[in-house]
Amino acid sequence: MNRPAVPQMVRRAFIARCAVAVPLSLIAWRSARAQPSSTVNMSGDFYLPVRPAAKPDAVPQLDETAVIALERELACPCPCSLDIYTCRTTDVACTNSPAIHRDVVLMVDGGYTGDEIVAQLTSTYGQRIRLVPSKSGFNLVAWFLPFVAVGTGGLVIARLLHSWRRNAVQAANGTPSDIRAIAVQGTDDELARLNAALRDDSR
Amino acid sequence: MILIGELSLWVAILMAAWTTTVSWAGGYQRRPDLVFSGERAMYATFAFTIVAAIGLWYAIFTHDFSLKFVASYTSMNLPSVYLFSSLWAGQAGSMLFWTLILSMYGAVAVYANRSRLRNMMPWVTGTMGLITLFFLMATAFGANPFERLDWVPADGRGMNPQLQNPGMAIHPPMLYFGLVATAVPFAFAIGALVTRQLDGEWLAAVRRWSLLSWFFLTIGIVLGMWWAYVELGWSGYWAWDPVENSSLLPWLTGTAFLHSIMIQEKRGMLRKWNVTLVVVTFLLSILGTFITRSGVIESVHAFAQSSVGSWFLYFLIAATILTSVLVSTRLKDMEAKAELESMVSREAAFLYNNLILVGIAFTTLWGTLFPIFSEWVQGEKITVGQPFFNSVNTPLGLLLLALTGIGPLIAWRRASTANLKRQFLMPVSMGVFAVVALLLLGMRHFYAIVFYGLAAFVATTITQEFVKGIGARRRMYQEGLALAGVRLVARNRRRYGGYVVHFGIVVMFAAFAGLYFRKDYVAVELKAGDTYAAVDPWGDTWTFTSEGMSTYNTLNRRVVAISLKTTRNGEPMGTMLAEKRQHFDATGATTFEPSTEVAIKEMAGQDVYVFFSGLTDAETAVMNFHFNPLVIWVWIGGFIMAFGGVIVMWPQTERRERGYVAELSPQHEGALVGAGA
């Protein structure tokens, strides 16, 4: 059995990892302390009335299909994780989603558009009534970051593949990828000439 | 017996502490006596954890309601199968069950490597001991299932009706077997990093355990989908709920690892990346456990909040920092001379496959944690639900499906133009044909058309590989079709088992796309004798005629059932029975909210899903009717994936491996696989 070798610390890599890990850990820690309660109680009353006055000469802007589509993008405020439409048609114990549905129908009858209805609900419940983050402000990060991350990953891979390809080409030519790698001392000009000579010999 | 169980839990803690201490000391001081003592202590930890679990089961089956856990999750009239499964119905019991699996895996890993990897094993054993110690302590101090009540109730509260389902009896154990198994590759990674042995046998051990984890996670996730579908009543099987996501995350990174490890095996490349994936997979399983058990993110599936959540948070932070330090100090050991002859090669395809899998994992994690980040930054918690995940992950899923077909067709190192033409001609043609056919048939949904086009492409690549392989065997060995097929798979289980898994993925994706065409008819009021007519996505007209409601008591519940006679285009299709249930305890007092049993008629083309929503008066039932295309293929796809996993995992004996190498080298191998092995 060999004694394990003494670890070689790569300081920069360690600091880089700590720079990522520590803030994330702190965020998670603070969040865990900040949100202590989440016992699931679907029958709880989370409903807040949203009943703005109808517009003059109101004409409904949404048909039934559009209402369903709208409600599929609104979160039931109880902790059922469902949208308003699914919750109100499924979880009979929940009194919140049918009540919000009634408000939505009233607003539709009052001539409000889909965006206006969402705005009315958001002003009362806050952003958590929406199942999708709005595409403005900080919430834009939610939408863009995944694609930015994957795009960056794609570029990194492309660069990696390119460097591997270069290694292969150099190996096929019988030339070390970097002449300095074999610890030859000399000026850049001397090294370039040595490199060329080695390449000629390998042919 | 209960007292013995409780005491065993404490003794197991001591044993796990001993395992860690003496194993690491033995590894550091190169003392075999300490190493062996540590290994025996790992076995002892497992043994005492079994006794603790048996003690709790004994308390459950003897209805000892002096234990808070037994009183909270069981009742006198709970059927036996659910008494057994109640161990994982609540926080404390499930912690003990988790620890039981963990200690078992630790013991098995030690036993399986009793004569291998001797330099590394002390560190592996010590790490497994440490993780087990953490779970045992979190169980004993954070969520102790042996905690006693000040008084003894006459009956327990009973089990949540939604958990009284066969799927729920099997789904959590499968998920636990998968999640816990990620600890073993992690322990091997720690061992390999400490001893700087990052090739060879380490890879084989890690791959085996990663496959096991992947296999159980696959089954667990699919069973969870099935349970949600049949039990929750909203006619869907995946809602991107935080708890669902937390089981998917390690599956995604584990799948990425199972692909990228092939590059290290074949070419010695990607050592850093593979170690990172192993570590991340384990950390994600701990993060998922934290999400499920802490209450930090709201979910209908989560356990009630308890102090055990903070245990996981501290463990996660400590494990992240310590592993980061260890990896950082070993970066030079993981350097490898990487060369690639061509940008068009299987290595490149696997790298992009990894990118997409990790990209989906990142997106899922990001969406799951975004409510926390948004509250942190904006002071307001944003809800991130199904529409977000569908919008972002669907394009990535399509890319992944495409790569599932592309990767296996491209040769390692370099693919020639002739090779590409030969390999891709038929699959691309079939994909294009499928798209054109669907357009001609009137399908206009963009994503659905792309899904089915890609599904046809991938299915053809897989079929093509089997046809070529079987054809080559038949020519070389004059074997019959069936024998050639069986031997082809049996003698290269990894390759062809992998293709079977890919086929399962194709079937599943095709089934997912079916939901774009679902049709819902909700809040339909029916009295006895009323008929409701609805058109399904295939254009057929269904009728549902109420035969009236019946009310009766059975086991631990009162049932109101509505019977519906169904027809399709006038043809009788049988009777469907949907139920509303109210559970009660042994004294007859009601427990929990009323629950629902949906009626499902499963067919190849669609499921007819009937949900008994409620009653408006004594005679009028409110019903939801859903037509969900191709759902049965989700379960079939899951089964195919698991079957493929069994093929891949099935041990290949040394004799056969040698025979195979002799039999198939090297020109035969080329003939068999077409694209080169």
Image (cartoon, helix red, strand yellow):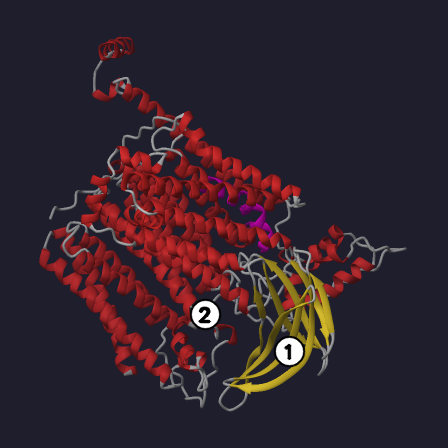
Q: Which amino acid does label 2 sit on?
A: Met
Q: Element at badge 2?
A: helix
- Magenta residue check for A47: no
- Magenta residue check for B382: yes
Residue B596 rendering spot, x and y as whole percentages: 58, 74
Q: What stretch is highlighted in magenta?
A: B377-404
Dot placed on the residue nearer the N-terminal end, 1 or 2:
2
Residue B157 rendering spot, x and y as whole percentages: 48, 82
> Where, quadrant-wise, is the C terminus of chain A in this rendering?
top left
Identify which residue, B339 or B551, lies in the foreground: B551
Against B476, is B137 above or below? below
Q: Which chain carries label 2?
A: B
Using the rendered view, name the quadrant where residue B540 is placed.
Answer: bottom right
Against B596, is B156 above or below? below
The mark found on residue B562 in the picture is: 1
Nearest to viewer (mark 1 / mark 2): 1
Q: Which chain carries label 1?
A: B
Q: Please give the name of the residue rendered at 44% of the width and 88% of the height, measured from the top-left corner.
A: B153
Tell me the distance, in whole angstroms, between the alpha carbons under discs 1 and 2.
25 Å
Q: Is residue B319 visible?
A: yes
Identify which residue, B617 or B140, lies in the foreground: B617
Residues beneath discs 1 and 2 located on the same chain = yes
Overall secondary structure of the magenta section: helix
- Which residue in the structure is indicated by mark 2? B168
Label 2 CA crowd tier, 10 Å (few <14, some 14–19, many 20+): many
